[in-house]
């Protein structure tokens, strides 16, 4: 929930399109943008990494050269690379139902500090890679934990707490880590599908990705990894950032979202992704994406892509 202090500032907008309420931190600035009337081709740019999360309404994001166009809804993230401007349309904004977005600009120095810590604590040496931010536009769906973090950051940035600077630093570090984990996880999935024999984790990731609809036997995964049980769980979590069960859960729901965008029925998607009942599937989907499968399907056009480079 947004604090009353912040709400009071937003209740007196200076402009009706992209009214900005900002709060600065040492390595980041958080802004809340409210739009109260329909508008088109509103330019947004930053010389630093900008993490955008929708709070309410709908935007249509497109590049200046129309290389892509995508709808942007709550429970989604849009990450803008430095010096890569975009344009925004606001088709649904009104005085009574404003379109609201949170944008967090993060300094290059802060991103590097988090990368350095990850390289020290969870190195990617087996992939000849280092933790680093991949400079590209990214549009993706985030889970409930990330949405909760964004809501919490609004209050952390805006409150007059004696430990505000420390708490802002922790929250920004967590947000960067989530972004880096998302990008690196995508890289590891691609690497695993192309070279499943590279190492034990690749073998397991490729197997899980190709058998989403099946019941998974943990002992079989351990055998496939060629590791002891303890080493397997430790290595998997260090590399992927979660347990094998949680990873499979995320893969299934992201596959479900992809199928819904391609106009598959909720029942088809449910059983294709390994769920045994539509009610269980709907509860899991809503917990992860913030809306139920039917609402999600209605929200998105069939040919919508979930990432743009």
Image (cartoon, rainbow, N blue to C red):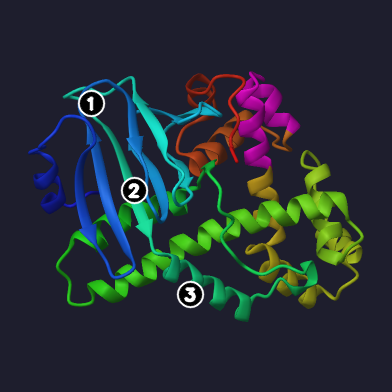
Report whether 96 appears left or right of 148.
left
- Residue 143 shown in magenta: no
- Residue 262 shown in magenta: yes
Quarter of the image for residue 197 reads bottom right
View extreme (bottom): residue: 120
Report whether 13 appears left or right of 288.
left
Decide: is 139 above or below 176: above
Decide: is 26 above or below 287: below
* Percent coordinates x, y for residue 10 in the rendering: 14, 42
Q: Are marks 2 and 1 in contact (CB under 8 Å)?
A: no
Q: Which residues are magenta?
A: 252-272
Marking on residue 97: 1
The residue drawn where x is 26% and y is 50% is 31
> Mark 1: few, some, or many residues within 10 Å (few <14, many ≥20)?
some
- Mark 1–mark 3 distance (CA, rounded to whole Å): 39 Å
Marking on residue 113: 3
* Percent coordinates x, y for residue 119 in the rendering: 62, 76
The residue drawn where x is 77% and y is 77% is 230
Where disc 1 sits, the SS reads loop
User: What secondary structure is the magenta-colored segment mainly?
Assistant: helix
Quarter of the image for residue 218 reads bottom right
Where disc 3 sits, the SS reads helix
> Mark 3: few, some, or many residues within 10 Å (few <14, many ≥20)?
few
Q: Earlier in the sequence, mark 1 or mark 3?
A: 1
Decide: is 213 above or below 42: below
- Mark 2–mark 1 distance (CA, rounded to whole Å): 19 Å
Q: Are marks 1 and 3 in contact (CB under 8 Å)?
A: no
Task: Pick the residue in front: 275 or 292.
Answer: 292
The residue drawn where x is 67% and y is 27% is 259
Residue pointed to by mark 2: 103
């Amino acid at each position: 929930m947004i604090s009353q202090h912040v709400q009071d500032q937003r209740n007196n907008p200076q402009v009706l399109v992209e009214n900005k309420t900002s709060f600065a931190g040492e390595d980041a600035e958080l802004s809340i943008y409210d739009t109260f009337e329909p508008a088109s081709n509103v330019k947004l740019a930053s010389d630093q990494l900008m993490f955008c999360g929708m709070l309410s309404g709908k935007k249509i994001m497109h590049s200046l050269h129309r290389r892509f166009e995508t709808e942007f809804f709550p429970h989604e993230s849009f990450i803008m690379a430095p010096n890569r401007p975009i344009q925004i349309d606001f088709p649904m904004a009104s005085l009574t139902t404003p379109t609201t977005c949170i944008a967090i600009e993060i300094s290059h120095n802060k991103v590097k500090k988090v990368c350095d810590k990850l390289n020290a604590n969870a190195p990617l040496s087996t992939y000849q890679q280092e933790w680093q931010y991949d400079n590209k536009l990214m549009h993706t769906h985030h889970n409930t934990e990330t949405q909760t973090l964004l809501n919490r950051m609004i209050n952390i940035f805006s409150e007059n707490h004696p430990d505000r600077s420390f708490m802002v630093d922790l929250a920004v570090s967590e947000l960067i880590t989530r972004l880096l984990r998302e990008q690196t996880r995508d890289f590891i999935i691609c690497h695993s599908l192309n070279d499943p024999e590279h190492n034990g984790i690749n073998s397991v990731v490729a197997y899980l990705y190709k058998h989403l609809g099946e019941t998974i036997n943990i002992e079989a995964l351990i055998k496939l990894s060629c590791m002891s049980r303890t080493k397997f769980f430790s290595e998997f979590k260090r590399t992927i950032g979660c347990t094998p069960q949680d990873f499979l859960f995320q893969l299934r729901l992201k596959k479900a979202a992809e199928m819904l965008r391609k106009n598959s029925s909720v029942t088809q998607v449910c059983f294709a992704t390994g769920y045994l009942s539509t009610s269980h599937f709907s509860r899991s989907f809503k917990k992860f994406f913030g809306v139920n499968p039917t609402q999600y399907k209605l929200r998105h056009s069939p040919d919508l892509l979930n990432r743009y480079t």
